[in-house]
Amino acid sequence: YAYTAAAIVSTFWLTTFQAFKVGRARKAAGIAYPQLMAEKAEAAASKEAQIFNCTQRAHQNTLESLPQLISATLIVGLKYPYFAAAACGTWTVARLLYTIGYSSGDPKK
């Protein structure tokens, strides 16, 4: 079960990486708190604002699916710990690559 736990911990590092990317993008775009996203006009006028929106959305999308992933990994890990760890680890790596591509400011990547 240690591999299962380690795979779940990897999601902490993923979301930490994403949070730092969001912070850097927010600062570069000049989007002040508590504004969650750049307005449509801001994103159209500024590449940095578009990058911020994409970075923020990638992070939000990850957080939306994290409870189901962690629950499923813990439950499946009781009987199939190696499979659960591999599946969770694969998801984490895929999310990392998705975040890097999507936060480029081009949602098609």
Image (spheres, grey):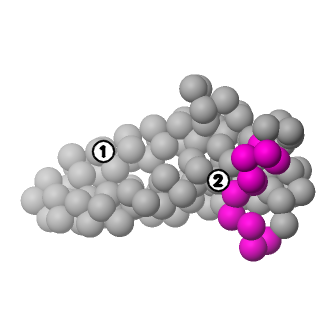
Residue drawn at point x = 52 percent, y = 63 percent:
12
Q: Position of residue 101 (x, y in %)?
A: 61, 32
- Seen in the picture, residue 34 relative to 72 is either above or below; the reply is below
Q: Earlier along the polypeptide chain: callout 1 or callout 2? A: 2
For residue 24, what is the image quadrant?
Answer: bottom right
As for residue 92 lying within the magenta part, the answer is no
* Quadrant (top left/top right/bottom left/bottom right) for the N terminus: bottom left
As for residue 38 lying within the magenta part, the answer is yes
Q: Secondary structure at mark 2?
A: helix
Residue drawn at point x = 75 percent, y = 73 percent:
34
Cβ–Cβ below 8 Å for labels 1 and 2?
A: no
- Nearer the observer, 13 or 30: 30
Q: Is residue 14 left or right of residue 34?
A: left
- In the rendered image, the residue lying farthest to the front is 41
Q: Secondary structure at mark 1?
A: helix
The amino acid type of the residue labelled 2 equals Gln
Say the numbered circle drawn on residue 86: 1
Q: Position of residue 66 (x, y in %)?
A: 40, 60
Residue drawn at point x = 86 percent, y = 39 percent:
45
Q: Position of residue 31 (x, y in %)?
A: 83, 59
- Nearer the observer, 76 or 57: 57
Q: Position of residue 44 (x, y in %)?
A: 79, 38
Q: Which residues are magenta?
A: 33-43
Q: Count residues near mark 1 (Cα–Cα under 10 Å), then give few for <14, some for 14-19, many for 20+.
A: some
Residue 80 in sight in this render: yes
- Seen in the picture, residue 30 relative to 91 is either above or below; the reply is below
Q: Which residue is mark 2?
A: 56
